[in-house]
Amino acid sequence: MEVSKTHENRWIILGIMSLSLVIVMLNNVTLNVALPEMSKDLQANNSDLQWIVDSYALIFGGMLLVMGALGDRFGRKRALQLGLVLLGLASAAAAFYADSSNDVIMARATMGFGAALVMPATLSIVIVVFPREERGKAIGIWTMMAGIGAPIGLLVGGWAVENYDWQMVFLINIPIILLALSLGLIFVPNSKDSKKTPLDPVGAILSIAALGTILYAIIEAPSLGWTSSEMILISGLGIILTYMFVKWERKAEYPMLPIGFFKFNGFSLGLIAIMLASFVMFSFMFTQMLHFQLVRGHTALEAAVRFLPLPLGLMPAAANSDRLSAKFGSNNVISMGLVLMTAAMAIFTTVEIDSEYIRLACIFLLLGFGMGLTLAPATTVVMDSIPSDKAGVGSATNDASREVGGALGIAIGGSVLNEYYQRNMEVPVGLELGNIPLESFPAAMQIGAELIEGGNILGLTLIENAQHAFMEGMIASATVMGVMAIAAAILVKLYMPSKIITNLIEEE
């Protein structure tokens, strides 16, 4: 009777999972636009602001595999509900009680923990309640919601800060979370590993340590320096911990993540496609938020509105990717999506400071279309490659590849941008700045504005030089993104199977 009810309500359940997923994705980026106001209100320095953002990503990414495994073992609905409660309580605490940067960092870390419970549960529940013939369509819609969450987050954050204050960025979570919780209690069935597979505590500890260290290294690389001794030490530790995790999982009687899954091209190449597509998307969004605000002079909300062509392209592509995959093969659809993303980056290299927004809108639309054709079928391939009893772990692996790809994109894309900015930045002849640093683009823009206010017309030249140098950095960053996307397209086209016939392990 429960199974029948589950399938009767599967589209309602998908809506609830989509709503829960959007909450997680919103919190990945929403706070970014509130940082300037928070720095003034909380007297937060740059390090504080970085950890206000990164504490969420670090805990979220590091805990994903373990939370997915716990959902499989003890119930995915329980994991989902507990995660939403943690997100809601931490949001309320930050909005009503936080009066220091440390308070906000703690709240964001708790939210990351809750998000690590929610995100794997949403996809694994979708997998369980949908029959195989409808799964591709359902995953396409799930992916669509994951993809549009970040642009919507920028829009919501910009609106909240412009019309209210930074606390509204947290408050806006609460009614959405209450709605998702209420609907989940009514409609979502509880599912878990029917085999009651014993837990893998050693694997869990090693996965948290390995993923957490890798994400920490990626996050800190731009500030520490990619070749610094600290970076080499942290990266080396991450590699050692990953090796220990893989070695343990190979010999464990009940591994949390069976390493054998990675021998299958559908599973491993699906994860690579997801990671590199996320690399491009988050790196491009990061650079364009700076572009719209600091080069083109838009407010946070005006900048966020200009991202809307991206979800407008992503939504129809993701929602219809299952039919295209059935007709042309998953590998061909995914590789075509990556080629479209490459084309978007290639077109961006022609953008100049005075280029009309319509060209940027077309780039965002093309990028969104490519994202939809890549992420949705790649997620379907990954999830079809594993048994449903491991749906939570499979979903967490999918989510971890997305998180690592996004973190890498921001770190590498930002580092390339900064490197080329510094190479091309020229101080106007006759302008004496002494020891005032111009390493960062925002600093150069601020100094230029102060010079203009003081009556020094060289401030205008400084701003123009900084803008041109920044454009060179963005073009270099887009070139790196394009190379990543086309490399992934070739790998997927050549080595990914066109169809996944059945699970790797037969379900009992």
Image (cartoon, rainbow, N blue to C red):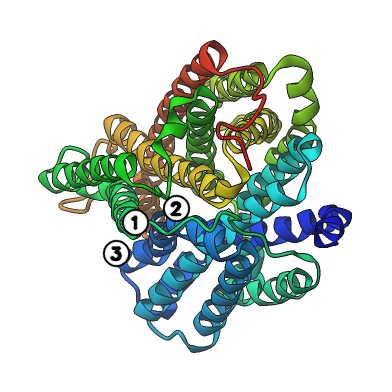
Q: Is residue 301 visible?
A: no
> Under tag 3, what secondary structure?
helix
Q: Residue at x 44, y 79 (%)?
A: 41
Instruction: From this view, report whether residue 459 is shown above or below residue 465.
Output: below
Q: Give the residue at mark 3.
A: 47
Q: Amino acid at mark 1?
A: Ile
Q: Which residue is mark 1?
A: 208
Sequence-first disc among 2 and 1: 2
Tags 2 and 1 touching, CB below 8 Å? yes
Task: Specify the quadrant that holds the C terminus.
Answer: top right
Q: Nearer the viewer, residue 336 or 416?
A: 336
Distance of label 2 from label 3 (alpha carbons):
28 Å
The residue lying at 76 percent from left, 37 percent from top is 132
Q: Would you place residue 44 above or below residue 459 in this image?
A: below
Q: CA distance from mark 1 to mark 3?
A: 24 Å
Q: Which mark sits nearer the N-terminus, 2 or 3?
A: 3
User: Outermost residue toward the top?
Assistant: 494
Q: Is residue 137 visible?
A: yes
Q: Picture coordinates of residue 430 (x, y %)?
A: 23, 40
Q: Nearer the viewer, residue 241 or 222?
A: 241
Camera-near label (1 vs 3) is: 1
Image quarter where the N terminus lies is bottom right
Mark 2 = which residue?
65
Q: Is residue 64 above or below residue 228?
A: below
Relative depth, front residue between 344 and 467: 344
